Amino acid sequence: MDLGIDGNAALVTASSSGLGKASALALAREGADVVVNGRDPNRLESAVEELRAEAPGRVVGQRGDLTDPADIEALVDRTVDEFGGIDHLVTSAGGPPSGPFLDMDDGDWYDAYDLLVMSVVRLVRLAADHLRDGGGTIVTITSRTVKEALDSLVLSNAVRMGVIGLEKTLSKELAPDVRANAVLPGVIETARINEIIEQALDRGDYETYEEGLADWSADIPLERVGEPIELGDMVAFLSSERSSYINGTAVPIDGGSISANL
């Protein structure tokens, strides 16, 4: 299916690895020109080289910390300078620390809000006019925790809800020129999952990596964890004209693991 985004300009944050990288790859495979972003310059350079080797779209890297307003401004400016505008904004960010409510202090809460919510606020504020010019799209990558609270993830459970409220508001305030949607990843085999399973192996919780992966898959109806590109392809679809009547929604990418009806 041709998504019709060849030559479009996309900015994907936190895209030197994980779900952001998969989203950037999916967009670039469709011919979009993509700015990828990360804090680690070596990892960012590696991601840029990998995407350039796999996709026809132009790919450039811009280092930046999503909690730094100056870095966010530089990200938007770089995209406009390189590609002449912004058609698609995909917001991703690393997860906040895990732990129960009583283990979190005020600093943890403010840091999580700055990373997860204010990064999106600042990006959209700077990119809105460019998105309007191109009839653009916004896709926010959040988490299944906005549908179903998970144990020991109080910061993600609570703070990511703010991103969904923002996304829904943007879908109304920026329409009809700009569409805004969210994707809610469940268990997907990113480097973070790899790390967790490897740590469990070191503790002796599992005998093999495959056993650990099967344990993570136990409550998923499709009986497996997801692949990053499966989320990336949905991001690319929501950024395209093929999804032109989808606006203000949040799409779980979780193999059916969320128990909520809605």
Image (cartoon, helix red, strand yellow):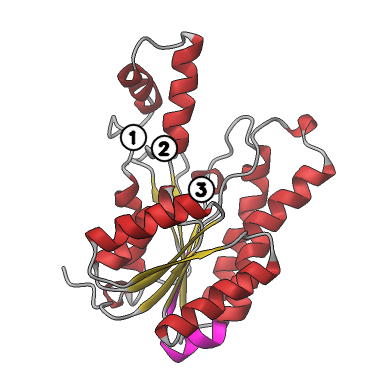
Give the labeled residue for mark 3. 143
User: Which of the 4 quarters of the picture holds residue 59?
Assistant: bottom left
Residue at point 59%, 74% (across, down): 74
Snapshot quadrant of residue 95: top right
> Would residue 135 be counted in the magenta stretch?
yes
**Inter-mark Cα distance, 1 to 3:** 15 Å
Secondary structure type for disc 1:
loop
Q: Residue at x 32, y 66 (%)?
A: 27
Residue 137 visible at all = yes
Does label 2 or label 3 sit earlier along the sequence? 3
The answer, for residue 131, to whether it is visible in the render is: no
Q: Does the residue at mark 2 contact the one at mark 1 (Cβ under 8 Å)?
A: yes
Q: Position of residue 87 (x, y in %)?
A: 41, 80
Residue at mark 2: 187
Q: Nearer the viewer, residue 262 or 27?
A: 27
Q: Give the residue pinned by disc 1.
A: 225
Badge 3 amino acid: Ser
Q: Position of residue 73 (x, y in %)?
A: 62, 75
Answer left or right for 70 relative to 138: right
Name the quarter where the N terminus is drawn.
bottom left
Sequence-first tag of 2 and 1 = 2
Query: Mark 2 and mark 1: span between their CA atoms?
Result: 6 Å
The kind of residue on which mark 2 rests is Val
Rendered view: 8 above or below 193: below
- Mark 1 or mark 3, which has the lower sequence index? 3
Q: Residue at x 44, y 22 (%)?
A: 198
Circle 1: is it few (<14), some (14-19), or many (20+) Cα within 10 Å?
many
Magenta segment range?
A: 128-139
